[in-house]
Every structure is written in C-alpha cells, then in structure tokens.
Image (cartoon, rainbow, N blue to C red):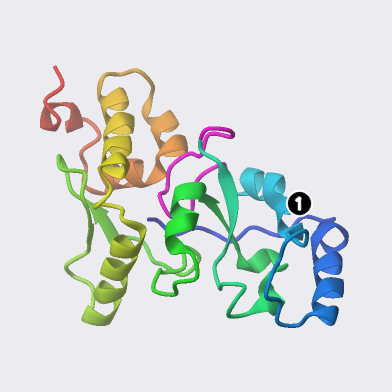
C-alpha cells in the first residue's frame, strides 16, 4: 500500500448519491438491509476515474471488467450507516480486496498511511512492515497485510510478479509501471533498483 490522496467529490454527487441516501436513512437510521438502496454505486465511475483506476489496497490497476472495481466503505455501513453515502468514506477497491476487508476495522486507511510504512522485498515481492516504524504502527501494518492476504494469497504475489517481469523484459516503460502498479514502481525508486532490477529478477 501507498498513501492515497483524497480527491474532491463530483459536482453532482449530492443529487445522485447523498440526497437519495439521506432520504432513505431518515426512514431507517440503522438499516438491516441495503437492497435497492446502494446509491453509492452511482458514483463508481467517478471514483474509478478520480483514483486513476488503481485499487487503494493492492495499489494496482483494476481492469474495468475483469478486475471488478467496487466502492469500499472504509468505515463499514454497519458501524456508521450515516457515512454510507459520503464520498469521503469511499475507497476504490478491487472486488477481492473489498471482500476481504468486509466490516473488519483492522485495515489501515489509505488516506492516512504515510510513505514507507509498507515496503516491498525483492526478489520475493513479499510486502513487509518497515522495521524502523514504532511498534504500534508496525503492528497495524502487519494486521493490514494479514487481513488483506497481500502475501498469503499466491495470486496477489503472482500479480505483482507479472507486472514487474513485464517491466524487466522491457514490454513497457517505467512510466507505465508507475501508472499501473505504483507501489512496485515506488519501491524500485526508493531502493534505487530501477536500473538493476532485471538482474535481481534474473531476467537476461
């Protein structure tokens, strides 16, 4: 994960999402079901564009169809239903990360994390907590990694590997890697590995 800068809400968000949601919540302040009241979905295209089509949790590009971009409520609807229709509570998430986060509250907010809290090991591509962090933050980073299964899911690691290997094989430039896999690109820059990563990954 890398820090995500909160983007301003769309100009028509009030009429398309918030107003409808507020009207619903006035009738049911603690909804037990949200069926046919998922007005936040009307903001998904805006969210997708505003956050450059990148998942806030995996820090990788979400293909429009195969990747299934979703609206994640950072503070769960079950905890703060009044935030269910608030742009500031929305995070762009791929379906897999959203399903893992669910209503758990042990995942760090991408809007609040700081640079270098999460680091990437090469060549294993395992995500770790920066060892220099104070213990309380380090614990939260580890909890986030565990909850989202960023290392436990082989597909997550393989996906990082796919992006990196394509770059190593010069299938696209570094600027494209920064756009589609910004965490990987950031770590290559931070660790000064941009020019030597191909040899580290044993790509001739």
Q: Point out residue 42 in the picture as x, y percentages from the top left corner.
A: 76, 51
- Callout 1: helix, strand or loop? helix
Q: Quadrant of the N terminus?
A: bottom left
- Residue 91 left/right relative to 25: left
Label total for image: 1
35 vs 44, nearest the viewer: 35
- Residue 16 left/right relative to 5: right
Q: Tell me the residue at 73%/59% (across/down).
A: 38
Tell me the crowding category of disc 1: few under 14, some 14 to 19, or many 20 or more residues within 10 angstroms, Cα based.
few
Q: Tell me the residue at 62%/68% (across/down).
A: 89
180 vs 25, nearest the viewer: 25
Q: Point out residue 29 in the picture as x, y percentages from the top left corner.
A: 76, 82
Name the quadrant containing residue 12.
bottom right
Q: Is residue 117 visible?
A: no
Q: Is residue 169 visible?
A: yes
Q: Tell me the residue at 21%/44% (across/down).
A: 125
Q: Point out residue 74 in the picture as x, y percentages from the top left corner.
A: 54, 68
Our reading of the magenta stretch's main secondary structure is loop
Q: Tell me the residue at 48%/39% (across/down).
A: 61
Specify start and end residues of the magenta stretch as a single range: 53-66
Name the quadrant containing residue 114.
bottom left
Q: Point out residue 7 in the picture as x, y percentages from the top left corner.
A: 64, 58
Q: Where does label 1 land, which residue?
A: 42
Name the quadrant containing residue 148.
bottom left
């Amino acid at each position: 994960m890398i820090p995500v800068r909160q983007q301003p809400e769309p100009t028509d968000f009030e009429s398309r999402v918030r107003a409808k949601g507020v009207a619903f919540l006035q009738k049911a302040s603690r909804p037990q079901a949200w069926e046919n009241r998922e007005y936040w979905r009307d903001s998904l295209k805006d969210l997708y564009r505003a956050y450059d089509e990148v998942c806030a949790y995996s820090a990788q590009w979400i293909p429009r169809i195969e990747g299934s971009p979703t609206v994640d409520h950072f503070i769960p609807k079950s905890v703060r239903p009044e935030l269910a229709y608030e742009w500031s509570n929305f995070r762009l998430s791929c379906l897999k990360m959203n399903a893992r986060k669910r209503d758990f509250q042990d995942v760090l907010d991408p809007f609040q994390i700081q640079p270098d809290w999460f680091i990437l090991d090469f060549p294993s591509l395992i995500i770790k907590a920066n060892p220099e962090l104070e213990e309380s933050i380090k614990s939260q980073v580890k909890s986030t990694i565990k909850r989202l299964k960023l290392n436990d899911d082989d597909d997550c690691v393989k996906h990082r590997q796919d992006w990196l290997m394509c770059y190593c094989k010069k299938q696209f430039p570094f600027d494209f890697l920064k756009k589609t896999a910004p965490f990987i690109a950031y770590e290559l820059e931070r660790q000064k590995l941009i020019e030597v990563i191909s040899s580290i990954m044993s790509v001739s």
